[in-house]
Amino acid sequence: MPFTESIHMVNRKVQTLDEFTIQQMRDFPHATGELASLLRDIGLASKRVNVEVNKAGLVDILGDAGTVNVQGEDVKKLDIYANNQLMGVLKHGISCAGIGSEELDDFIAFDDPVSNNSKYVCLFDPLDGSGNIDVNVSIGTIFSIFRRVTPLGTPVTKEDFLQPGINQVAAGYVVYGSSTMLVYGTRRGVNGFTLDQAIGEFTLSNPNITCPDHGRIYSVNHGFFYQYDERVQQYITACQKKDATNGGPYTQRYIGSMVADLHRNLIKGGIFMYPGTKDKPNGKLRLLYECNPFAFIIEVAGGKATNGVERILDIQPTHLHQRSPLFAGSRGMMEELETFLNK
Ligand code: AHM
Ligand code: MG
């Protein structure tokens, strides 16, 4: 067989997360490779978490760890495991100067000579939807990456973490579902990688994800319907009344695991809502660990994300664990929602 023919037969379709991020870097001659290395570290931690999540039913890792997190919620053992894995790889990697986590009271400045010279900080919800572990429903890891604002060579401070979401350099999530997927976005686009368990690599499966302008899925906790603002109730009712004459019918899907709910709506088109309630006007979701990263991804993919009044990415955070209502999804559906909210 001639050499040229055999070379064409080497059909190299598989692109790993590492290869992809390194290739992206080539377009930036001044890139140092720190972001690629940070994403690799997050990928590594999530592969370890994935192994434990997959055997959650088998080992004694279920149930409450007997502590209460800073939000006053019971902490499951896997939350702690995931938190420690992320903390560990990021501390020992070369690209992260400090972290903030939904599971930690305060941020951590790694404060060693290598970390102090790293330009990024990372915020994460190590295991979102952990109430679903016991019942084998999809859960996820969410992360958000900022360039530090304090000078290189010094330990990071709270200022580095309290940046508006618009400053995110990258954000992403890992969904531990029927397959495990890592999706991350930079300003250049959103790409999805499915974990090939056989070789232990995230491989590019969903290049250039865009959120359809219109969808037919609305996701909200109906149980709180009468606790929502009247205008939100009116929008939900309008969703229920959709039929073939006005872009419907709509379908309601709500797993109670925002990574899974938002992932599905991102791919298929839809709207996700976690509004404030009478008891909790700021809702449940955390601005820094949950709303910002998803708002960034959805916007880069062409959708919109607001707190009902303003763009999520424009909010100047005042404290690490602050909560925010979240409305996010397909642009057209968000614009329709806004006609109700602006009444
Ligand atoms: P968690 O961070 O404690 O896991 O809570 C966040 C989760 C989201 O994934 C999900 O969208 C929401 O809580 C569901 O809450 P509710 O049951 O109130 O609808
Ligand atoms: Mg969470």
Image (tube, rainbow, N blue to C red):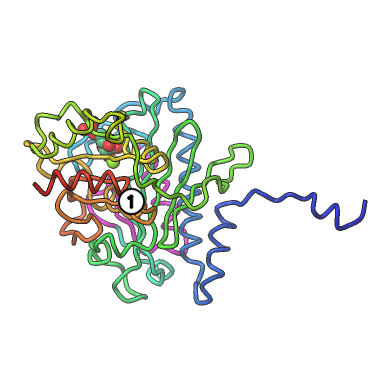
Say few, some or many: other residues with alpha carbon within 10 Å of mark 1 (under 14 / 14 to 19 / 20 or more): many
Along the line of sight, the residue nearer the viewer: 127 or 339: 339
What secondary structure is marked by label 1? loop
Q: Please name the amino acid that badge 1 sits on.
A: Gly
Q: Position of residue 17 (x, y in %)?
A: 55, 52
Q: Position of residue 308 (x, y in %)?
A: 16, 48
Along the line of sight, the residue nearer the viewer: 210 or 132: 210
User: At x 15% / y 29%, what residue is drawn?
Assistant: 224
Q: Is residue 156 among what the camera can see?
A: yes
Using residue 128 as the reference point, say whether residue 14 is left or right of it.
Answer: right
Q: Is residue 23 above or below residue 28?
A: above
Q: Residue reaching furthest right? A: 1
**Quadrant assignment for ligand 1:** top left
Q: Position of residue 105 (x, y in %)?
A: 22, 50
Q: Is residue 219 above or below residue 30?
A: above
Instruction: Answer with the quarter of the image where residue 174 lies.
Output: top left
Using residue 248 as the reference point, say whether residue 1 is left or right of it.
Answer: right
Instruction: Answer with the quarter of the image where residue 198 lies.
Output: top right
Report if residue 269 lies within the magenta region.
no
User: At x 22% / y 28%, what residue is drawn?
Assistant: 240
Would you say the beta carbon of the disc 1 residue lies within 8 angstroms of ligand 1?
A: no
Along the line of sight, the residue nearer the viewer: 319 or 309: 309
Along the line of sight, the residue nearer the viewer: 1 or 63: 1
Residue that mark 1 sits on: 303
Report if residue 89 lies within the magenta region.
yes
Q: Is residue 323 among what the camera can see?
A: no
User: At x 36% / y 75%, what residue is drawn?
Assistant: 152
User: At x 46% / y 44%, what residue is drawn?
Assistant: 46
Segment colored magenta:
79-107
Using residue 11 as the reference point, say whether residue 208 is left or right of it.
Answer: left
Q: Position of residue 147 (x, y in %)?
A: 35, 67
